[in-house]
Image (cartoon, rainbow, N blue to C red):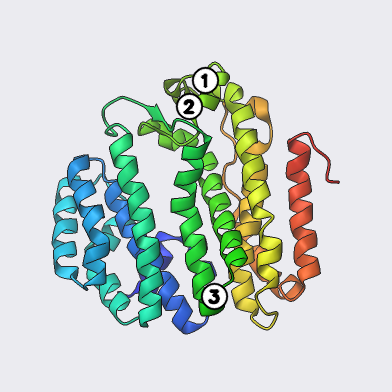
Amino acid sequence: MNIKYLLKNNARTIYLSAKILPKEKQKTFAVAYLVCRIADSVADTSLIEAKKRIEFIKNFPILVEHGNYKTAQEMALTFLSKAGENIYKNEAELLKNIDICIKEFKTLKKEYQKITLEVLRAVCKAMVQDLIFFPEENSGLIKALPAEKDTLIYCDYMGGQPGVFWAKLEFGKELKKETQEQALKIGRALQITNILRDIEADAKIGRIYLPLNQIIKQELMPQDLLEKGNYVKLYPVMLYWIKEAKNNLLNAKEFIKQIPRRKLFNRAAVIWPVFWSLDTIYLLGQNPHKQDKKTKRKITKTNIYLTMLLSPLYCFSNILINKIIDYKVSRIERLLGNRTR
């Protein structure tokens, strides 16, 4: 058992992106993702009362920082014994192997430990806020974030800060303020994509990350999103956030230019998630009157592998990358009722 195995089993596309990075950065990327995923797995273990999950998540960054894997392991095993079969196999395996992740964290360079802890603290803060704000998963209650700013704040913690982590990993002390802001916006967009893709699944556990003020304008209440027939009404809200994601993903153009062309794998690790996110929100924006039926919410494996296979043809060229982004964006803008200018 090692971190590569754990990463592969818990994140298909993330694993593919990490696999092509230089060895030291690959290891840091994997460790950072896995410790954040451990916290997320605990946050989602609904058979454990929220109070106990909050306690673990608040303390987890401290346990990681001090290499206290025994305490973390003991707490996680207690959760697993209570969760029983109500947790995915790969997540259970990850929780059983917290010691591997924390031990690997302690072998990282000090600067890599620092940025790993920064991103872990950020996502843990968002998870704690989730558990405090939203009702217990099995309560039968459902709640939405109040306004647009609340959705954006959540996305900046859960997606934006991981984007900043990546920028710090890539550029180190040479990272410019504007480049860090671009990274945050790209990560924000990736999280918006996740929210749009998972609306139905999140609603079933009582959580709506789209803002209540927008939902109400469509003559809907959060509990109405438990009925698929109401998703036609929700479509304008989805289009608003598709546009928001699209606008933020445009930052990838300038961001990618700052990674030297010789670093083909580093460039690919950034551009793949951007391409996949643009393709996903395009899928989600199609057929507004069929949102209540079984529609595709994920891109195909063929799409993923073609993006990877063709990397050597476009990753060296900023012009070609921009053209591909522009093409994908123009498809989305047609859905939004706007033509590319």
Give the number of callouts: 3
Judge the density around disc 1: few (<14), some (14-19), many (≥20) Cα neighbours within 10 Å. Answer: few
Q: Where is residue 70 in the image (x, y as percent from the top left)?
A: 14, 68
Who's the residue at 61% across and 23% down the image? 232
Mark 1 sits on what residue? 216
Give the mark, 2 or 3, whose residue is nearer the N terminus. Answer: 3
Image position of 262 (left or right of 15): right
Kindly state the secondary structure of the residue where label 3 is placed: helix
Image: 227 above or below 21: above
Kindly state the secondary structure of the residue where label 2 is placed: helix
Image: 59 above or below 27: above
Q: Position of residue 135 (x, y in %)?
A: 29, 31
Outermost residue to the front:
177
Which corner quadrant of the image does residue 47 belong to?
A: top left
Answer yes or no: is residue 283 visible: no
Who's the residue at 38% across and 28% down the image? 143
Mark 3 sits on what residue? 170
Image position of 243 (left or right of 74): right
Who's the residue at 52% across and 61% down the image? 163
